[in-house]
Amino acid sequence: MTYHFSKVVDASFEEAIAHVTASLQQEGFGILTEIDAQAAFKKKLNAEFRPYKILGACHPQIAYEMLQLDDKAGVLYPCNVVVQGHADGRVEVSAIDPLSMFMPVDSPQAREIAIAASQKMQRVIDRLPAASVSATPYDYAI
């Protein structure tokens, strides 16, 4: 079992973030956090890195239901979605599969909630525009 859903998208890096945000909203998710790994590595390590953002998404109803079952389940939140640019110009979106994320919560009800969350996240990724041709490479060092 893989722990994520991924798709190379037909969009620029910034467009991909907008597409992901809209697709998450259509499934009832909101973005709680945004981490710009490229900027953080530059600032903290003075290291060059490709465009890479981690969006911390949360579905309030799913979070509420899971916390009703296990008050420690919050350590598993949020559902992270990564948007990254590759040296060959591809932009890829990857999202955690909530089913794998919630596996440690051992209850039949938790599994049902996780399956529903997994289906929602799969639809988020499926909704994104798939790339059909190679894009122009980014001008940065890896």
Image (cartoon, rainbow, N blue to C red):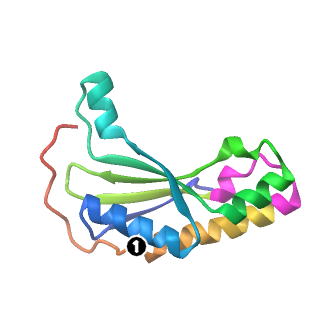
Image x and y of residue 106, in percent? 85, 50
Query: For the residue carrying disc 1, how many other residues have a C-alpha within 10 Å: few (<14), some (14-19), or many (20+)?
Result: some
Query: In screen coordinates, is 5 left or right of 110?
Result: left
Image x and y of residue 53, in percent? 37, 48
Image x and y of residue 75, in percent? 69, 40
> Identity of the amino acid at label 1?
Leu
Residue at image location 28% in from the left, 47% down from the top: 51
Query: In screen coordinates, is 20 left or right of 26?
Result: left
Under circle 1, the secondary element is loop
Residue at image location 21% in from the left, 71% down from the top: 133
Q: Quadrant of the C terminus?
A: top left
Which image quadrant is residue 11 in? bottom left
Residue at image location 36% in from the left, 39% down from the top: 37
Residue 107 magenta? yes
Q: Quadrant of the N terminus?
A: bottom right
The region drawn magenta spans 98-110
Image x and y of residue 102, in percent? 72, 52
Residue 78 magenta? no
Task: Relative to 130, say whether 13 is above or below.
Answer: above
Looking at the image, how many numbered discs can be counted on the residues?
A: 1
Which residue is tagged 1? 128
